[in-house]
Structures are given as structure tokens and as C-alpha cells.
Image (cartoon, rainbow, N blue to C red):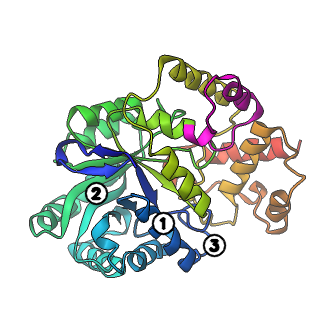
Amino acid sequence: MQYRNFGKLNIKGSAFGLGCMRFNGEGSQGSPANTEKAIGLIRKAIDGGVNYLDTAFVYLDQTSETIVGKALQDGYREKVTIATKMPIDRIKSREDMENMFASELQKLQTDHIDFYLMHGLNKEKWELAKKLGVDKYFNELKEAGKIRFKCFSFHGPYDEFEYIINDYDWDMVQIQYNFMDVENQAGTKGLELAGSKGIPVVIMEGLLGGRLANAPDNVQALYDAFPVKRSAVEWAFRWLCNHKEVATVLSGCNEEYQVEDNLRIFDTVEAGCMSEDELKLIDDVRAAYQSRTKIGCTGCRYCMPCPNGVSIPEVFRLWNESSLYGTDPKAGWDYKRLVDGQATPENCIECGACEAACPQYLPIIESLKDAWAYINK
């Protein structure tokens, strides 16, 4: 396992950080996780050298922290740093902050949290956090030794990222970043800005919700033609670790073989590990993807539940996959489940709740119409 410097914090973290949002194979919500299986995966990763675990209050219908807490018994807590998150949109008072933090400590079965993040900030949420005094509360927690580092995760445009990171004494930031998102959200500019301030950057969505793990034919042809043979997953992670500003890359695992493959990949990656020819390959791969992708939905499920029952991420996933892989979108069970469950875009009443919740700021209402027309053409 490669270990990387966490900027100004003078600590080292594993290049592979275990994301604890997708133990059920889905996003932050969805079907329940298999607790015993998840505990086994967490411990396997730690035994392999992973020392950074990422969870949050809301993940897995508020069960992820509990699973992590159980996994870290029997001496495993001392081997890792824990990152978890306070959902700002659930905070209305100082009492809410204190109750939330106490609940997270209890579920994680620990007396302190290493990296405590304000979850999913944009400028509006950051201004709300300051109005409520969350910034001052984080200072107090750090001074009391209840948290080690004050952090935030971010979904929003670059200008808001720049404002937030310059407006407080942050210790770490977590951003969505991959070779398809160089100009999206914080993007490369945000990564480099944080690095210039000595603030370590933790990467989420390195595989863009898994979409970069299975290359379509035109992308796979580029990989196959390259002299060095690597999987699509390895290319994506290697590209991320090539950046010196990256402290750790989060990867969610649902099976043992995924943990094992990640341990292998992150045993060899380091800053500057890619040649000019390899970087050119990724540029070509990006262009190939861009020529086929319909919408940049990562399946995070922040838009769910839809008030009228539309399965928004599933519709967009079917749309993208049918475009990427050239398959008949109506041929599989996914389409049948949408129709049988009355979860199609035909039920959309254009209330706008999904667009207000989307961290990607996608035009969901109009895109649902386009997607359904494409799927049923």
C-alpha cells in the first residue's frame, strides 16, 4: 500500500480509502446492507493496509456508521482514521449539532472522530452553517479533542468552492474528481487551489459512480491498443494518484475481489506515476466517453425519494448505459421494473424537488423527458 502526505497535517494516509456508502451495491440509500459481509470487507481492507475509512450520518439509510463502528472493534479502531459527516440541512440549532455528534460517536463506538466534515457544502449551505454557528462548534470540538480535523465535502461550482475554502481554517476537503470531471464542480482548479494552501484533498466518485469501471467498445479499443495493459479501473485510479495534491482516493467495495484488486492497484501508484503517453491516452478516453454519455448522473440518489415515485437515477442509468453500450434499453428487467413499479418519467409533476437536491445541478426535469423518449424510441 502506498501512503501519501496529508498536506499540512503532517500525517500519512493510505492511497486507497475505503468508502462506506455502497455496501448494498447502490448509493447512499436503497436496499439494506449485509452487515456481516460489510464488516468482513472493512477488516479485509484494513488488514491490507487501508487506514482511512469514509462514512456519513446519512449513508445506507443511517446505518453505515453503525456498521463501521462494529467493524472497528477487536483492536481495529486503533489502526485507522475515521471520516464522517454532519448533514447541515438537518441542523436547526446548537442542540441539533450536539445531538448529531453524540449520535455519531455512539454509532461509531469511539470517543473521537479524526476527520469531521460538513457534508455536501455549497455556498448556500455554508452561509447557513455559519449563521447557525456550526463553524464555531467545529472549533470547539477540535479544541476539546473530540475531532482532530475540521473538513468539508463539496458539490457545487468552482466559484463557490473557492469562496468556501478561503473563508475558514479548513484542515481537509473532499471533492468529486475523476478524469471526466476536470472542469466540473471543484475540478482541477479546485484540486490545485487546495494543494496550494496545503489542504489535503480526498477524492470521491473516482469512478464516476462506477461508470468508468466498464469501458464501452470505443473506449476499450483505446485501452487495448495501448502497449501497457491495465483495467479501466486501474487506469482511472492511476490517473487520480498521478496528482500530487490527492491525499487518498475513496473506493466503495461490495465484494472481496474488489478489495483485493484495489489493494493491488494502490500498492504501485504514486504522484507522477504516469508518462506523457499515458496521460494522452486518458485524454483520448475522455473524448471517447464524452461522445456517448447522455447525462452526468452518478447515481448518488440525493434526488430520491421522488414525491411522485419516479425512479430518477434508474431512468438516467438506463439512458446512459443504452447509449454507452448500444443495448436495447427495453430488453432487460430494469425497464420492466420501472414500468411495473409505475416509476417512469410519465409520473413526473415537475415539482422541482429533485433539481433542488441534485449535487450535480443537473436539469433533471427536461432530461427525464429526453431520456424516456430515447428509451422508448
- Going 51% across and 48% down the picture, which residue do you hit? 264
Using the image, determine if residue 334 lies above or below residue 373: below
Report how far apart the C-alphas of labels 2 and 1 lie in the structure: 39 Å
Instruction: Give the SS element for disc 2.
Output: helix
In the rendered image, residue 229 lying in the magenta stretch gets the answer yes
The magenta span reads: 212-234
Tag 2–tag 1 contact (CB < 8 Å): no
Q: Position of residue 96 (x, y in %)?
A: 28, 75
Dot 2 crowding, Cα within 10 Å, few <14, some 14–19, many 20+: some
Q: Amino acid at mark 3?
A: Ser
Q: Which mark is residue 128?
A: 2
Q: Is residue 133 visible?
A: no
Query: Between disc 3 and disc 2, whose residue precedes?
Result: 3
Judging by the rendered image, the residue that carries numbered circle 1 is: 44
Tag 3–tag 1 contact (CB < 8 Å): no
Using the image, determine if residue 8 lies above or below residue 303: above
Nearer-the-camera pick, 295 or 24: 24
In this rendering, which labeled residue sits more in front, label 3 or label 1?
1
Tag 3–tag 2 contact (CB < 8 Å): no
Q: Position of residue 112 (x, y in %)?
A: 22, 72
Q: Which mark is residue 182?
A: none
- Going 61% across and 69% down the picture, which residue do you hit? 30
Using the image, determine if residue 370 lies above or below residue 314: above
Q: Position of residue 2 (x, y in %)?
A: 37, 45
Which corner quadrant of the image does residue 197 belong to?
top left
In the rendered image, residue 373 lying in the magenta stretch gets the answer no
Report how far apart the C-alphas of labels 3 and 2 lie in the structure: 32 Å
Instruction: Give the SS element for disc 1.
Output: helix
Judging by the rendered image, the residue that carries numbered circle 3 is: 31
Q: Amino acid at mark 1?
A: Lys
Report how far apart the C-alphas of labels 3 and 1 lie in the structure: 23 Å
